[in-house]
Each structure stands twice: as structure tokens, then as C-alpha cells.
Image (tube, rainbow, N blue to C red):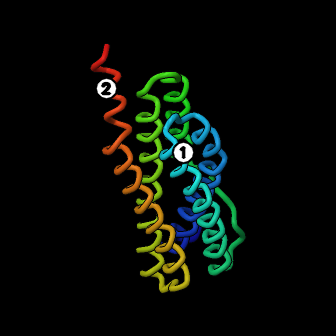
Amino acid sequence: MAEKTLHDLFHETLKDIYHAERQILRKMPKMVKSVNSKELAQAFQNHQKETEMQIERLEQVFESIGKRPQGKSCEAMKAILEESEEVIEDFAGSDALDAGILGSAQAVEHYEITRYGTLKAWAKQLGLNDAVKLLDASLKEEEKTDMLLSKIAEQTINAKAAHQAAAK
């Protein structure tokens, strides 16, 4: 059996994030419908469009390395998304629902940030300049979304959830 290389690891991780992004895209409409905050729903809708573009970029990265776009089951993202489903079920009707969904969305963003950052570094090391540019564009979008979600949490969502708790 041939020794595995960084290029092999890059390809396997690329398949992981490709599957993760596709899972996220399928769950986004439910997240949009579940939240009460119009601002948070709008942020999710905007990020849904970005996610579609990120999937297209990943397909371009696959093409640039001569591989067919395919996913490999991303168990980490499955678990994060299952937790968000639990939050939606357990906190329905509560002011804490939006805070919980937002927290779950940030867990998604943080996973994506680590994957895109790692893939970008490996692509750079491997001399895959086209991939570096594509991965960097998605990384910047994920970081921007994470910062927006933090801002929404700090300015409105968390205070509303805390106010409900204090009123009891």
C-alpha cells in the first residue's frame, strides 16, 4: 500500500468540507423558519446564498486537482446539525430559541473556518495557487458571517433571552 501524502490528506479533507457544506445548505431553510429575529433570519438567508457559492468554489478546487467533486460523510457536521435540531425542538416558543440557534450556527461557522483555513494552508504548501484563492474567498466569508452572528448575539438576541429569564 502506497504511503499517504499531504495531497491525499488535502483531497480527503476537501471531500469532508464538501459534504459538510451540502448538509448545511439542506438545513438552512429550517433554521430560517425557526428563528423569531428577522435580522437573524436575514443573516441566515444571506449565508445560504454564500454557501451555494462556496459549494461551487469547492467544485472548482476538485476540478483544479483533477478530481471529481464528491463528499465524504462529515460526522462532525452531522453532530453539530443534530444538536441544532435538538435546540429547535427543546426551545421552541422560548426567547432563548434564537440564542440557541445562533450558537449552533456559530459552531457550524467555527468548523468551517478551521477546515477552510487548514485546506488553504495545505494548498499553499502544495503549490495549488488556484485552490488557495478559492479557499481563501470562502474562509473570508465564513469569518465575516461569524463576526456578524456575534454582533447580532451581543446586540439583541442574548439580551432578549436573558430578559425572558430575568422576568421569570
Identity of the residue drawn at 40% across and 62% down: 143
In this rendering, the answer to whether 139 lies above or below 100 is below
| Picture disc at residue 118 | none
Specify the quadrant that holds the C terminus: top left
Q: How many numbered marks, from 0 up?
A: 2
- What kind of residue is marked 2? His
Q: Nearer the viewer, residue 22 or 67?
A: 22
Among all residues in the image, which is located at the extreme left? 166
- What kind of residue is marked 1? Ala
Which residue does the numbered mark 2 point to in the structure image?
163
| Place of residue 84 in the rendered image (x, y in percent of width and height, measured from the top left) | 51, 35
Identity of the residue drawn at 49% across and 79% down: 132
Identity of the residue drawn at 55% across and 56% down: 47
Among all residues in the image, which is located at the extreme right? 68
Identity of the residue drawn at 38% across and 47% down: 152
Specify the quadrant that holds the N terminus: bottom right
Q: Nearer the viewer, residue 166 or 70?
A: 166
| Place of residue 154 in the rendered image (x, y in percent of width and height, measured from the top left) | 31, 44
In this rendering, the answer to whether 36 lies above or below 13 is above
Which residue does the numbered mark 1 point to in the structure image?
41
Q: Nearer the viewer, residue 63 or 103?
A: 103
Among all residues in the image, which is located at the extreme top? 168
In this rendering, the answer to whether 94 lies above or below 58 is above
Q: Earlier in the sequence, mark 1 or mark 2?
A: 1
